[in-house]
Image (tube, coloured by chain):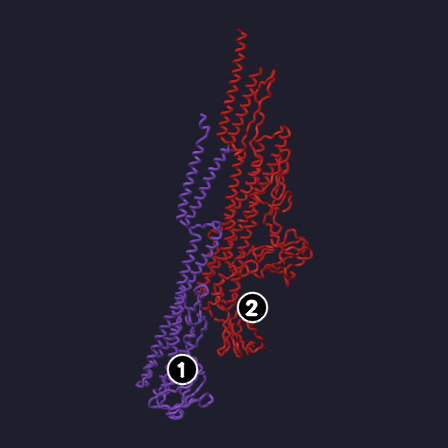
Amino acid sequence: MRVSTSWIQQQSVGSMMNRQSDLSDLNTQLSTGKRINQPSDDPVGAARALDMSHLIADAAQYQRNITSANARLGLEEQTLANSGNVLQRVRTLLLQAANGSQTDGSRSDIAAELSQLRGQLLGQANSTDGQGEYIFAGNRTGTQPFVSGDSVSYLGDDGQRMVAAGPGLQVATGDAGSAVFMDIPTGNGTFAVSAAAANTGSMVAGASSVADPLANPSAWDGGAYSIVFTAADAYEVRDAGGAVLDSGSYDPAKGGSVTFRGAQVAFSGTPDAGDTFALGASGKQDVFTTLDNIIKTLRTPNGGDAAMQNALNTQFANLDQALDSITRTRGMIGARMNALDQQGALNDDLTLQYKTSLSDVQDLNYYDAISQLGAQTTALQAAQQTFTKIQGSKLFDYLR
Amino acid sequence: MADMLSTGVSGLLASQIGLSTVSHNVANVNTDGYSRQVVSFGARLPEGQAGYYVGTGVNTVAVQRAYSEFLNSSLWSASSGQGRASTMASLTSQLNNQLAGSSNLQTSLDSFYGAVQDMANAPSDAASRQVLLARAGGLATTFRALSGQFSQLSGQIQQQVRDTVDAINVDTQSIAKLNEKIRSFSSTDGMPPADLLDQRDALVKKLAGEVGISVVPQNDNTISVFAGNGQALVTGTEAHALGTAPNVYDATRVEVVGAGGGNVISGRIGGGALGALLDFRSNVLDPAQIQLGRAAQALASAFNAQHAQGVDLHGDVGGQFFAAAGPSVQGASTNTGSGTVSASITDIGALPAKEYVLSFDGTAWSMRDTSGNPVALAGSGTSADPFTAAGLSLVVGGGASAGDSFRVQPSRDAAASFAVSIDQPDKIAAAAPFVVAAGAGNTGTATARASIADGSDPALFNASSIVFSSPTTYSIDGGPAQTFTPGQPIVHNGWSMQLDGAPQAGDSFGIKPNSNAQGDNANALMLGKVADLGVLDGGVTSTGRAYSQLVGQVGSAGALAKDELTTQTAVYNQALGAQQSVSGVNLDEEAANLVRYQQAYQASAQVISTANSIFNALLGAVRS
């Protein structure tokens, strides 16, 4: 077949151009390290790479969220630890104060220290984070939550801030002050015992408990009852209507406990006939009221009698509930931080996986690309040499 | 005896013509469209003697171009395909470059939603709110920048369409003129000069690269040229100029019209650069603009809806966060009536990536998409009962005449107009609007949550309490007893309360404004979830996904155009190679021919010289 001279030239030039364009593409790929430099390089891959980058950005944001949540929870945990220490100190002082060897004066000194501790606790409850937000104000983070007047009132709300820690996982990053410091059950958490003000004997109600709630969960029905001592060694349990439900004997010398409907109350001392102890379902009492009550009781002159012991015992139970509330909250914080750590590790794993996928989709295989670079360079040189060879051999050259 | 001298001279002349033709071929070795010329010789009629004939030399019969009509028309059609493919490749590559550039919408979306989450982590922090607004601004800029790049490309295409039409008109003029010359040569000399035919063929090839054509040769050696759809461009010696005219719905959009301001033929031009320009515009760029607009509308609608479910730092219901234009409606410039059409989006999830034409036939309205498929209209078109179709609501005003039509572009302008409506950081609605509390003594299993049903209700933030007197009866704030249907929300004062579980008689639920809750991030968390919320296509496609679809679409168009270019270039090269193998000049061949004619010339000269010697010898014999 005959071939035209200019066609040979065009073709040689064309093939050199093609090689150079391939080399330029390879150059772009090698210098960016990416296989896809334009969506048209691999339309499906380009769309997939976008989705992958979105997932990676998402996971990175979740990690940021977790970091910020951990900081918030850490601060809360620290504050609660301090509050716990304050309450522990209160407990120690209360045990001291309950000792019969105390005098009005020494009790008053203890009350003074307790009053300091109450101030400390109030300060803890009104703690702010680095941005000046009140930690325990629920969602009203700009409002000082605990305001002390005659009693402490709570101006925050019950809101709990959440953080998105992963796809579909939200973790609370705080606890409302109402739950931690305010809504604390009284007594043993199920019922509370209080001595009637008119009691004249030396009888003191001690620890109370719900007997084996699992074995007989419906035994304690949450009603209001009273234990009335009809004599120093006999008692009756009456319901709210005054009907006698149960009766028994009591040994003033040894002390003992009264058990009925799953409730158990320990007594010591000698009652006078007619002394009454009321049992009612637990109410709510904030920790500051508990402290105020203790302080008020300790400052009552001529104390040390059974009335004071009873009052202190009642508040002692309430104090333990407050301590319990703080411990429980700290436990929940620990659980949340655990969940965040786990989600963080999961996010890391996912990020790695997404990055691997993204790399598979868009990153260049250097071995491939470099060997291609070699092949293309050789091809270009071959095209150039062929061109010079072909252009160099013309019949006209021999016609001189 | 035969005239040896004259025979020699005939050889001499023939060789000269051969040499001239070789020189002409060599001289035109690099002339585009040149066909190599070939001399054909024939022996002269012999002189008859008694019983035998003596030859009398050579005649030059013709100088013809080496030409194959079949190969040439293959080349023209390949040129058409190649012109189309290379224009398409360059346009799609431009669009791909734009999407590969810095204005990556996905990155902007990610950093925007990242800022939403950061704000959720510190909702009362002014800095985090400020950053969110800045990121929102960045996102809006990206939308507008991408849309701007698309519009710029669209403007560039308008200009290229006009330029290409001009170039086509110049070429058809030249072809018509060459037709005239060729015809006049044909009538006088019988055969038109090869070089004129070559010139015309080269022009036809160039024209084929500009627009898909068919060529019909005529008896008088002229050719007629038609554009792909049958529109005559050249008939005999007359050229028919194509024109450009503004689109009937959009004066800024150029359409190609037939000669003499005839019909719009934009949609019927297949090959060549012009075909590629029009095809790219309607099949790649328009869909890309629509898809980008849809992404903008999806983002604005979903984010605004969630934003209106929260309250800002002042306790006010969240206002519009993003603004994106809704549908635009353009009446045709040919409309004679005074009718109007207004359109709005009612259901973004049902909105396809299409545009529509609504037309009035004198009695009824009908709608078609731009591909011509009819779309059923529900409703009557009044503002009380608008037409609804494809997620759109259309209200037509009276006064339309028969034949009037309106184009509805649901998403075209959305990305270009995308903006952030909020400029105060404290206007970002991060908090939940209500605090809903179940009564302390509730015995039922019901839990309640409330959302805003009508943010403009003046009593929205009045505290209320709902008391159930039986599991299916409740009253609000001591009002009349109402029936409660499980699963149905209780709507009052602009809020809507959803109960999960079963309430019991005596249960109560209180709802009050979430006041002073600057630390509440409930709505901010919900705003963060909008990132992956399906909005489009019946609620399956998120904004980010819509963008990656756009990238996929544009990428496919680019990849297709690249492949097409490779294929068409190969086809073109093959056609050109085949045509050149017949018509192209080969210098080696010409060198050989040069030697051949030179030797023939020398030989003929030798014949004359010999004749001379013979004659001299004869004279000498007579003289002595």
Task: Give the crowd class for mark 2: few <14, some 14-19, many >=20 residues within 10 Å.
Answer: some
Local secondary structure at mark 1: strand
Query: Picture coordinates of residue B600 (x, y %)?
Result: 51, 22
Task: Give, as a three-letter code, the residue at label 1.
Answer: Val
Residue of label 1: A210
Q: Position of residue A41 (x, y in %)?
A: 47, 49
Residue that mark 2 sits on: B454
Question: Which quadrant would residue B417 be assigned to in this image?
Answer: bottom right
Label 2 marks a residue whose chain is B
Q: Which amino acid does the dot numbered 2 rest on?
A: Asp
In the displayed orientation, state which residue is furthest to the left.
A101
Instruction: Please provide percent x and percent y for residue B7.
Output: 56, 19
> Which color has been applied to chain B in this rendered view?
red
Q: Is residue B201 visible?
A: yes
Against A351, residue B230 (above or below) is above
Mark 1 falls within which chain?
A
